[in-house]
Image (tube, helix red, strand yellow):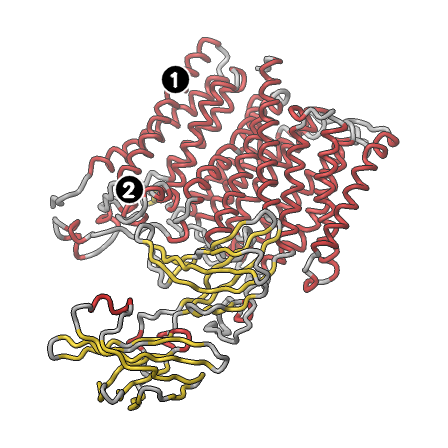
């Protein structure tokens, strides 16, 4: 059957390029391997030229696949399943790229794209000695990634998932039996509501750059093992490890910023399994970076550096399995669903982990190692202790995160902790204590040995200053975690000292040890940033306050809801409500037709008149087969705090058809007062053709209206004006409502207007009440965290620059 309107060429070209990239990467792998294995220099150059040509073809193919898939998505070619599943005609242009990484296939493509970019930098900068073995590993990883989007069956086994498959070949529906089925496919499913945020345009590319870059230290380690040359590779890997640490760390914190702006768990981190899966490789990488520095300066810890760099990349692959296998689907807010590729994902781990560990342990004894124990008063000793702490921390996090995997393998039924956040925090807070103190004191030691008087003299003043500042902060800000016990409360106070100590001691070292030369103080700058991150986390998380304590007694939330009725305030439209030091009003809501979000204007006015501002939390209708609405938070940013709010319940005034309350009819005369459950209402006067804005559309008709004043028990007053519209010989009632009092007024019979008499219907019903229920937090000094992230990344970048310059000066091959 010939189908009408299909655009088959982009998909055919795309699938061809996927196959081409796989074949080219296989050739590049063999070529680069041969380029350092053959003995003849002429053959080496010949193999290297072939490998580079193949890698160029592979790069062009990957770019072509990327461009073709973007073309399919941006041109709404819904005959392709990927476009239909992840895009829609109404999707904003800036979110088109987000459609790539919503699907697994697109994220694998992004990973491969970064490998291509990094590969060419490696070819240009690595040097002839290490290019062959390093690029062998990178090209083989590219081959594995290409199989992930291949989508071809071999002997009944499906290899990869093809992003260019046609919708009619994947779904069964009667429309696909018709040649013109595309006329029934009006639109796509659209992008997941949670991903429609600008952070999700920039966060995934940076995060995947971090993931992709971890292969470079791994590849250098593998190069040392493949060549059985354990000298030299670690120095070449060092700037790459710094780059990877910066990129991956920045990507993780961009994800935290996205969570802060888009998710409603009330912050930037919730120990979500997918968050953990990205954090663990970073912790191990930083541990490896520090053992690499130890080896470079003292000759110790080369074996540890090998192992930690290898484990970093293996943990990236394991994290990929966790997030893409569907095994975390019930425990994470942003894990992928299973595409039937679990065996392939496990094979991806195995083909890198098993050969690496085999070569490592086979050559373990030949890897240079200094048998003499490190001096306790040496920098390398405490750096190694810090690396062990980082590694221990990562194993605890990944162990708790892997509970679903453990249950799956062993058939166990280990339940996750009831309080996941506290379960991680009670261990990691002590990690923060140790790391903060080690980060502070380690730079004051010298390599190999440090005279005790020298060390104590240098560290004395930073310690005293840090202790004073941390005591002042503890008393001034307080730490409100007493509900978890005195031990945890004490740990938080010590951790605050550790964070301040890291900042003060490293800033002091820049001044004392480096004579203020910031250009050569990259490690101290990164450590200052790390201390600021710790301090920002401790202050903002431990002093986070819920401002939306419900004092009205009104709450639509049920006992079964995840949100507490006590911590959520209900705001009735137009009614100013007490919220601690603020008076808060739900002003209005507006549907933005561009992004299809409904924004709610919430006005905050400080009781002491020191400030006033408005927040605009929004909701977007869920798609992807999910019902209901997804709320997005809004925040007011001050220098010393954030006011953070999100909606937890909305009224739906459009569902008045569900209202079973009937009108109570009453014949009244102007001036009469009548009662309702919360006060009284009074007909002030009867009017003909009143001049009111709500009647502007009926300027050519005759109107009869009743002006009503509603007075509540506490003295608040509201106006209503129900009316009749005389159109021809027909009277059309125009009811009016007092939303905050749940009242509807309607004229039933004109009665006798000359005698000021009219029949009015009154109905009390919550179906007309427009309200929102919201949670509001205050995060004190959260900007310390974000500043710390930027300072840390700056320190990493400074380190990269210094080491690259040093390699250029020394001419290291």
Relative to 553, is 373 on the left or the right? right
Q: Position of residue 166 (x, y in %)?
A: 24, 45
The answer to whether residue 599 is above or below residue 27 is: below
- Badge 2 is on which residue? 73
Q: Position of residue 519 (x, y in %)?
A: 64, 24
For the question of whether residue 426 can be seen, the reply is yes
Q: How many numbered discs sit on the rendered protein? A: 2
Q: Position of residue 270 (x, y in %)?
A: 55, 54
Of helix, strand and loop, which one carries label 2?
helix
Please give the name of the residue rendered at 83% of the width and 37% of the height, measured from the top-left corner: 460
Please give the name of the residue rendered at 23% of the width and 43% of the height, measured from the top-left corner: 77
- Badge 1 is on which residue? 50
In this rendered view, identify the residue nearer to me: 239 or 655.
655
Of helix, strand and loop, which one carries label 1?
helix
Q: Position of residue 212 (x, y in %)?
A: 48, 34
> To which quarter of the image does residue 628 belong?
bottom left
For the question of whether residue 491 can be seen, the reply is no
Please give the name of the residue rendered at 61% of the width and 39% of the height, measured from the top-left corner: 284
| Eye-nearest disc, 2 or 1 | 2
> To which quarter of the image does residue 653 belong?
bottom left
């Amino acid at each position: 059957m010939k189908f009408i309107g299909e655009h088959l060429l982009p998909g055919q070209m795309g699938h061809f390029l996927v196959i081409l990239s796989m074949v080219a990467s296989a050739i590049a792998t063999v070529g680069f391997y041969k380029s350092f294995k053959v003995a003849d220099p002429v053959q080496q150059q010949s193999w290297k030229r072939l490998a580079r040509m193949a890698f160029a073809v592979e790069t062009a193919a990957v770019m072509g696949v990327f461009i073709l898939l973007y073309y399919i998505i941006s041109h709404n070619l819904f005959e392709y399943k990927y476009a239909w599943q992840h895009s829609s005609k109404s999707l904003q242009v800036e979110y088109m790229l987000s459609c790539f990484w919503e699907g697994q296939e697109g994220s694998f493509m992004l990973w491969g794209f970064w490998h291509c970019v990094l590969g060419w930098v490696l070819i240009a900068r690595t040097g002839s000695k290490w290019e062959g073995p390093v690029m062998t590993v990178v090209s083989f990883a590219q081959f594995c990634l290409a199989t992930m989007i291949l989508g071809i069956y071999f002997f009944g086994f499906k290899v990869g998932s093809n992003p260019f498959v046609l919708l009619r070949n994947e779904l069964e529906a009667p429309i696909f039996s018709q040649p013109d089925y595309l006329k029934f496919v009006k639109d796509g499913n659209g992008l997941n509501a949670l991903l429609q945020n600008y952070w999700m345009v920039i966060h995934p590319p940076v995060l995947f750059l971090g993931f992709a870059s971890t292969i470079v230290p791994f590849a250098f380690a593998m190069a040392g093992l493949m060549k059985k040359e354990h000298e030299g590779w670690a120095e070449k890997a060092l700037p790459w490890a710094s780059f990877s640490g910066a990129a991956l760390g920045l990507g993780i914190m961009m994800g935290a910023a996205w969570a802060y702006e888009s998710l409603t768990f009330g912050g930037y981190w919730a120990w979500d399994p997918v968050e953990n899966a990205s954090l663990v490789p970073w912790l191990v990488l930083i541990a490896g970076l520090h053992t690499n520095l130890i080896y470079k300066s003292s000759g110790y810890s080369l074996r540890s550096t090998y192992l930690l760099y290898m484990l970093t990349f293996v943990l990236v692959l394991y994290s990929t399995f966790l997030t893409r296998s569907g095994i975390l689907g019930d425990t994470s807010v942003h894990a992928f669903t299973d595409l039937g590729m679990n065996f392939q994902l496990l094979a991806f781990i195995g083909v890198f982990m098993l050969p690496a560990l085999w070569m490592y342990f086979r050559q373990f004894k030949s890897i240079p190692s200094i048998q003499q124990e490190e001096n306790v008063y040496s920098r390398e000793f405490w750096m190694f202790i810090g690396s062990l702490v980082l590694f221990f921390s990562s194993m605890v996090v990944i162990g708790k995160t892997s509970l679903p995997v453990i249950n799956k393998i062993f058939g166990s039924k280990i339940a996750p902790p009831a309080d996941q956040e506290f379960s991680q925090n009670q261990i990691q807070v002590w990690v923060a204590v140790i790391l903060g103190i080690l980060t502070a004191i380690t730079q004051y030691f010298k390599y190999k040995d440090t005279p005790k008087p020298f060390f104590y003299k240098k560290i004395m003043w930073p310690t005293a200053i840090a202790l004073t500042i941390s005591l002042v902060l503890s008393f001034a800000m307080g730490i409100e975690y007493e509900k978890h016990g005195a031990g945890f409360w004490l740990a938080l106070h010590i951790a605050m000292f550790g964070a301040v100590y890291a900042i003060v001691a490293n800033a002091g070292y820049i001044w004392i040890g480096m004579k203020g030369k910031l250009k050569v103080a990259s490690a101290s700058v990164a450590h200052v940033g790390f201390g600021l991150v710790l301090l920002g986390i401790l202050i903002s998380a431990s002093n986070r306050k819920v401002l939306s304590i419900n004092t009205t007694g009104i709450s639509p939330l049920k006992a079964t809801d995840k949100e507490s009725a006590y911590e959520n305030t209900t705001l009735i439209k137009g009614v100013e409500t007490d919220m601690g030091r603020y008076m808060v009003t739900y002003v209005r809501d507006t549907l933005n037709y561009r992004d299809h979000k409904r924004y709610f204007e919430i006005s905050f006015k400080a009781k002491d008149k020191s400030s006033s501002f408005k927040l605009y939390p929004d909701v977007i209708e869920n798609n992807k087969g999910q019902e209901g609405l997804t709320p997005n938070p809004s925040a007011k940013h001050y220098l010393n705090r954030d006011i953070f709010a999100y909606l937890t319940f909305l009224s739906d005034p459009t569902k008045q058809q569900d209202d079973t309350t009937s009108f109570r009819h009453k014949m009244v005369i102007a001036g009469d007062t009548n009662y309702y459950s919360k006060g009284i209402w009074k007909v002030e006067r009867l009017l003909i053709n009143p001049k009111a804005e709500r009647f502007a559309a009926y300027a050519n008709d005759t109107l009869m209206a009743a002006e009503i004043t509603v007075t509540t028990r506490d003295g608040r007053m509201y106006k209503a004006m129900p009316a009749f519209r005389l159109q021809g010989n027909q009277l059309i009632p125009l009811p009016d409502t007092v939303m905050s009092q749940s009242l509807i007024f309607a004229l039933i019979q004109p009665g006798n207007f000359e005698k000021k008499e009219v029949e009015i219907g009154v109905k009390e019903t919550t179906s007309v009440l427009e309200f929102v229920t919201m949670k509001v937090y205050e995060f004190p000094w959260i900007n310390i965290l974000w500043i710390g992230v930027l300072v840390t990344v700056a320190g990493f970048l400074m380190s990269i620059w210094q080491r690259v310059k040093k390699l250029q000066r020394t001419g290291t091959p």
